[in-house]
């Protein structure tokens, strides 16, 4: 555990369950770590991958999402949708060099103050053990992680990515199959390819803006991408206004 490290944790809690559980834990004067800053939403189904990526981009060390137990959502299926959103977020975080389990999704009913205390204490201790975002991740240093996340936030707004996510959500709902393996497979196969491609496009735009011009070779090295991904990015960039690609040089169009 990192000595003296006080993690910054964002809590996004459903109004009806986890928020009420945290409230009742406070009223009952249970002791638990004070590291969580809470945003209250009406349902975990309202939470978007973008919100979580943005929190990490702004240097949160962890994001803890708390909702109603499955089958108890006040809007019926909001927390099932949150399962898919959370899996997409985990896969994107991994792709950005962030440990996926820096984000947690847990359930606690309004009557479960003690459960909330146990969950948040264990989670905070785990994040303390991981240290500050970027300090103990597998390979990426923090500035690189922040660049990946900045691009990922933009990618999460892309219509093609959102529509791929919507189609997976509809399909799983229709088949009523929310098993972890199925969610993981659908997200990996149907959403992540579009998400990663868009993230790389957004990251290229950031690099060009920063360096003013970029050779193809530099781009491949900066993004650590395959030839196939490089071709797809160049093809997409060539259709964008504001970017010019000539003789192996990518730059802002004059
Ligand atoms: S109302 Fe609590 S998760 Fe939907």
Image (cartoon, rainbow, N blue to C red):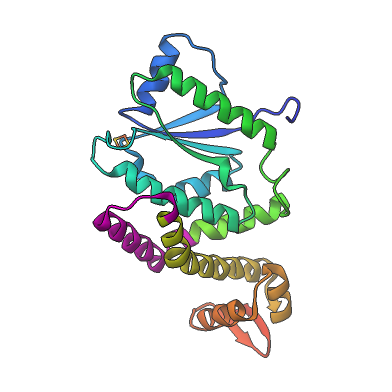
Q: Residue at x 73, y 25 (%)?
A: 4
Is residue 166 on the magenta stretch? yes
Is 4 above or below relative to 196?
above
Q: Residue at x 34, y 25 (%)?
A: 109
Residue 38 x/y as whole percent: 46, 30
Is residue 165 on the magenta stretch? yes
Is 56 above or below relative to 158?
above
In which quadrant will I find the N terminus? top right
Is 35 above or below relative to 25?
below
Residue 88 x/y as whole percent: 46, 54
Name the magenta segment's main secondary structure. Answer: helix
Q: Is residue 80 visible?
A: yes
Q: Residue at x 69, y 46 (%)?
A: 134
Q: Which segment is the magenta one?
A: 155-181
Residue 32 horizontal side relative to residue 81, left or right: right
Residue 201, by quadrant, is bottom right
Residue 198 horizontal side relative to residue 220, left or right: left
In which quadrant will I find the C terminus? bottom right
Residue 108 x/y as whole percent: 39, 27
Pick the front one: 103 or 210 = 103
Residue 133 horizontal side relative to residue 112, left or right: right
Q: Quadrant of ligand 1?
A: top left
Residue 27, by quadrant, is top left
Residue 244 x/y as whole percent: 58, 83
Q: Is residue 253 visible?
A: no
Residue 98 horizontal side relative to residue 22, left or right: right
Pick the front one: 186 or 154 = 186
The residue most toward the right is 3
């Amino acid at each position: 555990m990192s000595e003296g490290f006080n993690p910054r944790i964002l809590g996004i809690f459903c109004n009806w369950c986890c928020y009420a559980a945290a409230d009742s834990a406070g009223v009952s004067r249970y002791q638990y770590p004070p590291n969580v800053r809470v945003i209250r939403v009406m349902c975990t189904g309202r939470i978007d991958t973008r919100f979580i990526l943005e929190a990490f981009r702004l240097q949160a060390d962890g994001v803890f999402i708390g909702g109603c137990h499955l089958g108890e959502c006040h809007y019926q299926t909001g927390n099932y949708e949150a399962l898919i959103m959370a899996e997409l977020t985990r896969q994107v975080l991994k792709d950005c060099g962030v440990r996926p389990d820096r984000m947690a999704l847990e359930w606690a009913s309004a009557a479960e103050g003690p459960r909330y205390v146990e969950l948040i204490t264990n989670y905070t201790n785990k994040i303390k053990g991981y240290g500050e975002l970027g300090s103990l991740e597998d390979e990426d240093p923090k500035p690189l992680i922040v660049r990946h996340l900045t691009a990922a936030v933009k990618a999460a707004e892309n219509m093609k990515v959102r529509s791929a996510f919507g189609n997976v959500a509809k399909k799983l709902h229709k088949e009523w199959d929310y098993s972890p393996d199925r969610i993981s497979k659908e997200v990996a196969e149907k959403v992540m390819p579009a998400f990663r491609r868009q993230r790389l496009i957004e990251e290229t735009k950031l690099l060009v803006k920063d360096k003013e011009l970029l050779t193809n070779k530099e781009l491949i090295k900066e993004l650590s991408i395959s030839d196939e991904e490089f071709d797809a990015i160049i093809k997409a960039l060539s259709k964008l206004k504001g970017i010019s690609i000539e003789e192996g040089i990518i730059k802002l169009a004059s």
